[in-house]
Amino acid sequence: MQCPRCNWQNPAANKVCFSCKAVLPVTAHEAPAQRPGPGVNAPIFPGIWARLAATAFDAIVMVAAMVGLSMAASYTYQGLTGADGPALLAIAGGLLGLLLPAFMDAWGNGSPGKRLLKQRVVTRKGSSPGLLRSIWRHTLKYSLNLALPGPFHHIQQAVFGERAMHNALAGTHVVSSQVNPRVVLPALARVRAVTGAGRFLFIVFGMVALVLAGMVIAVVALDKDDADSPLRADVIHLDLVSDPVRLLAESYYQRTKTFAPDMAALGVTLESLRTSGFSKLEMNPVNGVLRFTIAGDPGTAVLPSLGGKHLVYLPELRSEKKGGGVRRWRCGSDDIPREDRPYSCRHEAGALAR
């Protein structure tokens, strides 16, 4: 071993120079073996059961935070003002608890469940997700995965794999926090991206789910609304029996390109109106509005009735390129309350009724 200070040639076993007593450098084969860094042997991407365990723990913390923050907001308001806290304040406190794991994923070292099980959420660049991305991921995770269980999980696994839908759509990954950061980025780069066919299938299934959910909500809301008003069924019946008169008005406009000035121009008589449940028909030759007066005695608070009230129809015209004529009639009333009319007859007709 040659001394780097005085160039004396020393035996290989010497640790110091025989001539100048300087410490000799250690050869490569004598360098101590370095221990592997922490987490070198840990999997980069945790398995599905480890992620589910973290999600379950986060759900428990989330529910506790929602209840605690909601109660704290209400009690604080009550202590400061002496009055009961508004419902909106309690809802705001519960919303903060609902989003608590998302805040911790965005600003901290991970949600409680992920910190407990040594996981963290990162973007494709290996950095922490921002607040908006984290909230979007959190919303997808706890809404669709809980609202669409069973076959939905098999569908999303077929499209998105083990990464899961909420991570794929939010552009995030769940990795082990014990893994050496230098090996995370190459692993993220090798993750299979969602194919165009997969995204198309997901969009189709999502649209179908939204349409079905909207139909269910609409049916429930309409059924509940129909049960509230005893006069709504009468309005629906009168709307149906007025349809022949509207058809005559459409035919008149199609022939003459003008609105009928009176009932005689349509061939409608007062007797035919009465048999349909109406006592009078007013027609506006300028805008084509039809105003039906409902026959019968006026109602009272004890015995409500539609007698003397009105149904108003405003024509909507087609463009001349599409053949012209009346496209549809917008039903409304200037004196029947909205809650007594079906959704198809909620047009505000007050300004056009006369």
Image (cartoon, rainbow, N blue to C red):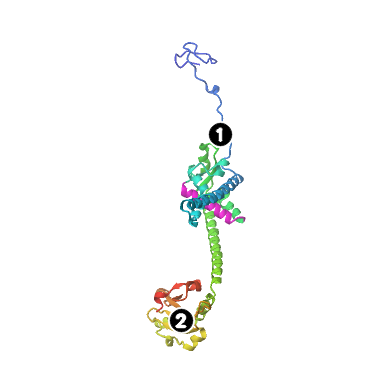
Question: From where the camera sits, is residue 250 visible?
Answer: no
Q: Position of residue 219 (x, y in %)?
A: 56, 67
**Helix, strand or loop for the magenta stretch, by majority:** helix
The residue sitting at the front extreme is 82
Foreground residue among 229 and 220: 229
Q: Is residue 63 left or right of residue 264?
A: right
Q: Is residue 27 magenta?
A: no
Q: Position of residue 81 (x, y in %)?
A: 46, 53
Q: Nearer the viewer, mark 2 or mark 1?
A: 2
- Identity of the amino acid at label 1? Pro
Q: Is residue 139 magenta?
A: yes
Identify the residue position indicated by label 2 in the image.
292
Q: Which mark is residue 38?
A: 1
Of label 2 and label 1, which has the lower sequence position?
A: 1
Local secondary structure at mark 2: strand
Q: Which residues are magenta?
A: 130-150
Q: In the rendered image of this protein, does residue 16 appear above or below residue 335?
A: above
